[in-house]
Protein backbone atom coordinates (compact mmCIF):
# COMPACT_ATOMS: atom_id res chain seq x y z
CA UNK A 1 0.00 0.00 0.00
CA UNK A 2 1.36 3.38 -0.97
CA UNK A 3 0.67 6.18 1.53
CA UNK A 4 0.55 9.64 -0.05
CA UNK A 5 -1.03 11.43 2.92
CA UNK A 6 2.23 13.34 3.43
CA UNK A 7 2.03 15.21 0.13
CA UNK A 8 1.09 18.40 2.01
CA UNK A 9 4.81 18.75 2.78
CA UNK A 10 5.47 19.53 -0.87
CA UNK A 11 3.04 22.46 -0.52
CA UNK A 12 4.54 23.68 2.79
CA UNK A 13 1.29 22.99 4.57
CA UNK A 14 -0.20 21.00 7.41
CA UNK A 15 -2.03 17.77 6.73
CA UNK A 16 -5.36 19.58 7.28
CA UNK A 17 -5.32 22.50 4.81
CA UNK A 18 -6.34 25.96 6.07
CA UNK A 19 -10.07 26.52 6.49
CA UNK A 20 -10.87 22.78 6.37
CA UNK A 21 -12.39 20.56 9.08
CA UNK A 22 -11.90 16.81 9.23
CA UNK A 23 -14.92 14.55 8.86
CA UNK A 24 -15.18 10.78 9.17
CA UNK A 25 -18.27 10.81 6.95
CA UNK A 26 -17.95 10.95 3.20
CA UNK A 27 -20.48 13.56 2.01
CA UNK A 28 -21.73 13.43 -1.60
CA UNK A 29 -21.48 16.49 -3.84
CA UNK A 30 -22.73 16.35 -7.42
CA UNK A 31 -24.06 19.00 -9.76
CA UNK A 32 -27.11 16.84 -10.47
CA UNK A 33 -28.44 13.31 -10.14
CA UNK A 34 -26.18 10.25 -10.10
CA UNK A 35 -26.10 9.19 -13.78
CA UNK A 36 -26.68 5.57 -14.77
CA UNK A 37 -23.55 4.40 -16.53
CA UNK A 38 -24.23 1.76 -19.22
CA UNK A 39 -22.59 -1.60 -18.41
CA UNK A 40 -20.92 -1.65 -21.84
CA UNK A 41 -19.35 1.83 -21.49
CA UNK A 42 -15.89 2.40 -22.85
CA UNK A 43 -13.22 4.67 -21.45
CA UNK A 44 -12.03 6.94 -24.25
CA UNK A 45 -8.67 8.64 -24.64
CA UNK A 46 -8.29 11.13 -27.45
CA UNK A 47 -6.56 14.30 -28.61
CA UNK A 48 -2.78 14.70 -28.48
CA UNK A 49 -1.90 11.00 -28.21
CA UNK A 50 -0.24 8.44 -30.50
CA UNK A 51 -2.99 5.89 -29.89
CA UNK A 52 -6.57 6.95 -29.28
CA UNK A 53 -8.07 4.35 -26.96
CA UNK A 54 -11.52 2.94 -26.28
CA UNK A 55 -11.12 0.55 -23.36
CA UNK A 56 -13.83 -1.54 -21.75
CA UNK A 57 -13.96 -1.34 -17.95
CA UNK A 58 -12.42 -4.85 -17.82
CA UNK A 59 -9.59 -3.81 -20.12
CA UNK A 60 -9.00 -0.69 -18.06
CA UNK A 61 -8.75 -2.70 -14.84
CA UNK A 62 -6.18 -4.97 -16.52
CA UNK A 63 -3.73 -2.06 -16.69
CA UNK A 64 -1.17 -2.06 -13.85
CA UNK A 65 -2.98 -0.79 -10.76
CA UNK A 66 -2.18 -0.06 -7.13
CA UNK A 67 -3.80 0.86 -3.82
CA UNK A 68 -3.04 4.17 -2.16
CA UNK A 69 -3.98 5.85 1.12
CA UNK A 70 -4.96 9.42 0.32
CA UNK A 71 -6.68 12.44 1.87
CA UNK A 72 -9.67 14.04 0.15
CA UNK A 73 -10.28 17.80 0.39
CA UNK A 74 -13.62 19.28 -0.64
CA UNK A 75 -13.74 22.96 -1.59
CA UNK A 76 -16.83 23.40 0.63
CA UNK A 77 -14.64 22.89 3.71
CA UNK A 78 -14.42 19.24 4.73
CA UNK A 79 -11.55 16.80 4.45
CA UNK A 80 -11.68 13.01 4.76
CA UNK A 81 -8.37 11.44 5.80
CA UNK A 82 -7.08 7.96 4.92
CA UNK A 83 -9.26 7.00 1.96
CA UNK A 84 -8.01 3.77 0.38
CA UNK A 85 -8.33 3.95 -3.38
CA UNK A 86 -7.38 1.23 -5.84
CA UNK A 87 -6.76 2.29 -9.42
CA UNK A 88 -4.51 3.13 -12.34
CA UNK A 89 -2.22 6.13 -12.02
CA UNK A 90 -2.49 8.94 -14.54
CA UNK A 91 1.13 8.47 -15.72
CA UNK A 92 0.41 4.77 -16.41
CA UNK A 93 -2.59 5.67 -18.54
CA UNK A 94 -0.69 8.47 -20.31
CA UNK A 95 2.14 6.10 -21.17
CA UNK A 96 -0.33 3.51 -22.44
CA UNK A 97 -1.84 6.07 -24.84
CA UNK A 98 1.48 7.63 -25.85
CA UNK A 99 0.98 11.31 -25.09
CA UNK A 100 2.55 13.47 -27.79
CA UNK A 101 5.08 16.25 -27.16
CA UNK A 102 2.63 19.06 -27.92
CA UNK A 103 0.18 18.04 -25.16
CA UNK A 104 0.12 20.62 -22.35
CA UNK A 105 -3.30 20.28 -20.79
CA UNK A 106 -5.96 17.70 -19.92
CA UNK A 107 -9.76 17.69 -19.92
CA UNK A 108 -11.58 14.96 -17.99
CA UNK A 109 -15.05 14.04 -19.26
CA UNK A 110 -17.84 12.35 -17.32
CA UNK A 111 -21.16 10.57 -17.89
CA UNK A 112 -23.15 13.45 -16.32
CA UNK A 113 -21.62 15.95 -18.81
CA UNK A 114 -19.28 17.22 -16.08
CA UNK A 115 -15.83 18.26 -17.19
CA UNK A 116 -12.76 19.42 -15.29
CA UNK A 117 -9.32 20.51 -16.47
CA UNK A 118 -5.74 20.47 -15.24
CA UNK A 119 -2.33 21.25 -16.74
CA UNK A 120 -0.63 18.04 -17.88
CA UNK A 121 2.13 18.44 -15.28
CA UNK A 122 -0.48 18.49 -12.48
CA UNK A 123 -1.82 15.18 -13.83
CA UNK A 124 1.51 13.39 -14.34
CA UNK A 125 1.71 12.55 -10.63
CA UNK A 126 1.51 9.13 -9.04
CA UNK A 127 -1.37 10.15 -6.74
CA UNK A 128 -3.71 11.12 -9.59
CA UNK A 129 -5.70 7.91 -9.86
CA UNK A 130 -8.51 6.49 -11.96
CA UNK A 131 -10.14 4.51 -9.17
CA UNK A 132 -12.91 1.91 -8.92
CA UNK A 133 -12.44 0.79 -5.30
CA UNK A 134 -12.85 2.73 -2.03
CA UNK A 135 -11.84 1.16 1.31
CA UNK A 136 -11.87 -2.33 -0.23
CA UNK A 137 -15.36 -2.07 -1.75
CA UNK A 138 -16.49 -1.19 -5.28
CA UNK A 139 -16.68 2.60 -5.53
CA UNK A 140 -20.28 3.56 -4.61
CA UNK A 141 -22.32 5.06 -7.47
CA UNK A 142 -22.92 8.34 -5.63
CA UNK A 143 -19.14 8.76 -5.21
CA UNK A 144 -18.55 8.22 -8.91
CA UNK A 145 -18.74 4.47 -9.46
CA UNK A 146 -17.96 2.55 -11.55
CA UNK A 147 -14.86 4.76 -11.87
CA UNK A 148 -13.73 8.26 -10.94
CA UNK A 149 -10.60 10.37 -10.75
CA UNK A 150 -9.05 11.50 -7.44
CA UNK A 151 -6.69 14.45 -7.07
CA UNK A 152 -5.47 14.65 -3.45
CA UNK A 153 -3.14 17.56 -4.27
CA UNK A 154 -6.15 19.62 -5.41
CA UNK A 155 -9.70 20.30 -4.19
CA UNK A 156 -11.88 17.37 -5.10
CA UNK A 157 -13.80 19.06 -7.92
CA UNK A 158 -10.70 18.39 -10.03
CA UNK A 159 -11.56 14.67 -9.77
CA UNK A 160 -14.32 13.69 -12.20
CA UNK A 161 -16.80 11.15 -10.88
CA UNK A 162 -18.28 8.71 -13.45
CA UNK A 163 -15.27 9.48 -15.64
CA UNK A 164 -15.88 8.55 -19.28
CA UNK A 165 -12.65 9.68 -20.85
CA UNK A 166 -9.62 11.91 -21.03
CA UNK A 167 -8.79 14.43 -23.71
CA UNK A 168 -5.20 15.61 -24.16
CA UNK A 169 -5.07 19.25 -25.27
CA UNK A 170 -2.45 21.45 -26.90
CA UNK A 171 -3.98 24.58 -25.29
CA UNK A 172 -5.56 25.14 -21.84
CA UNK A 173 -9.36 24.96 -21.63
CA UNK A 174 -11.76 25.23 -18.69
CA UNK A 175 -14.16 22.67 -17.32
CA UNK A 176 -17.63 22.92 -15.79
CA UNK A 177 -16.84 24.61 -12.44
CA UNK A 178 -13.74 26.37 -13.74
CA UNK A 179 -16.05 28.31 -16.10
CA UNK A 180 -18.43 29.09 -13.23
CA UNK A 181 -16.20 30.76 -10.67
CA UNK A 182 -14.24 27.99 -9.00
CA UNK A 183 -10.48 28.38 -8.98
CA UNK A 184 -8.70 27.00 -12.03
CA UNK A 185 -5.71 25.99 -9.90
CA UNK A 186 -7.50 24.65 -6.75
CA UNK A 187 -4.51 24.29 -4.40
CA UNK A 188 -5.98 23.50 -0.94
CA UNK A 189 -2.88 24.76 0.94
CA UNK A 190 -3.22 28.15 -0.76
CA UNK A 191 -7.02 28.14 -0.28
CA UNK A 192 -7.53 28.60 -4.01
CA UNK A 193 -11.30 28.01 -3.81
CA UNK A 194 -12.88 30.64 -6.01
CA UNK A 195 -11.55 32.60 -8.96
N1 LIG B 1 -18.87 13.90 -12.87
C1 LIG B 1 -18.85 14.67 -11.80
N2 LIG B 1 -17.73 14.70 -11.06
C2 LIG B 1 -17.66 15.48 -9.97
C3 LIG B 1 -18.74 16.32 -9.61
C4 LIG B 1 -19.92 16.28 -10.41
O1 LIG B 1 -20.92 16.97 -10.17
N3 LIG B 1 -19.91 15.45 -11.50
N4 LIG B 1 -18.64 17.11 -8.49
C5 LIG B 1 -17.27 17.46 -8.07
C6 LIG B 1 -17.25 18.10 -6.79
S1 LIG B 1 -17.69 19.74 -6.76
C7 LIG B 1 -16.74 17.48 -5.67
S2 LIG B 1 -16.50 18.31 -4.21
C8 LIG B 1 -16.44 16.03 -5.68
C9 LIG B 1 -17.29 15.35 -4.63
O2 LIG B 1 -17.04 13.98 -4.55
P1 LIG B 1 -17.93 13.09 -3.59
O3 LIG B 1 -19.38 13.27 -3.98
O4 LIG B 1 -17.45 11.71 -3.75
O5 LIG B 1 -17.71 13.62 -2.19
O6 LIG B 1 -16.69 15.43 -6.94
C10 LIG B 1 -16.36 16.24 -8.05
N5 LIG B 1 -16.51 15.46 -9.24
MO1 LIG C 1 -17.15 20.54 -4.63
Image (cartoon, rainbow, N blue to C red):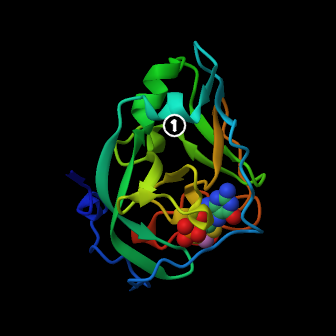
Q: Is 143 placed above or below 29 here?
A: above
Q: Residue at x 58, y 55 (%)?
A: 145
The reply to whether residue 183 is visible in this rendering is: no
- Mark 1 burial class by Cα count in 10 Å: few <14, some 14-19, many 20+: many
Q: Is residue 130 left or right of residue 81?
A: right
Name the residue nearer the viewer: 193 or 79: 79
Name the residue nearer the viewer: 37 or 175: 37
Q: Residue at x 26, y 63 (%)?
A: 5
The spot of residue 120 in percent (x, y) is 51, 37
| Residue 29, quarter of the rendered image | bottom right
Q: Residue at x 58, y 20 (%)?
A: 102
- Residue sitting farthest toward the front: 39
The spot of residue 99 in percent (x, y) is 52, 21
Q: Is residue 49 left or right of residue 65?
A: right
Name the residue nearer the viewer: 189 or 63: 63
| Residue 17, quarter of the rendered image | bottom left
The reply to whether residue 151 is visible in this rendering is: yes
Q: Which residue is mark 1?
A: 120
The spot of residue 30 in percent (x, y) is 68, 69
Q: Is 189 placed above or below 57 here?
A: below
- Residue sitting farthest toward the top: 50
Amino acid sequence: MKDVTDLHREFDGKRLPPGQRETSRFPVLSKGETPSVPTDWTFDVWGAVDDELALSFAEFKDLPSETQTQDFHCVTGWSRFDCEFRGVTFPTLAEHAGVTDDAVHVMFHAHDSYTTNLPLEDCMREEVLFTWELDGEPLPAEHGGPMRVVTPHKYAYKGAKWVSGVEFLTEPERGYWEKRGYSNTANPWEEQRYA
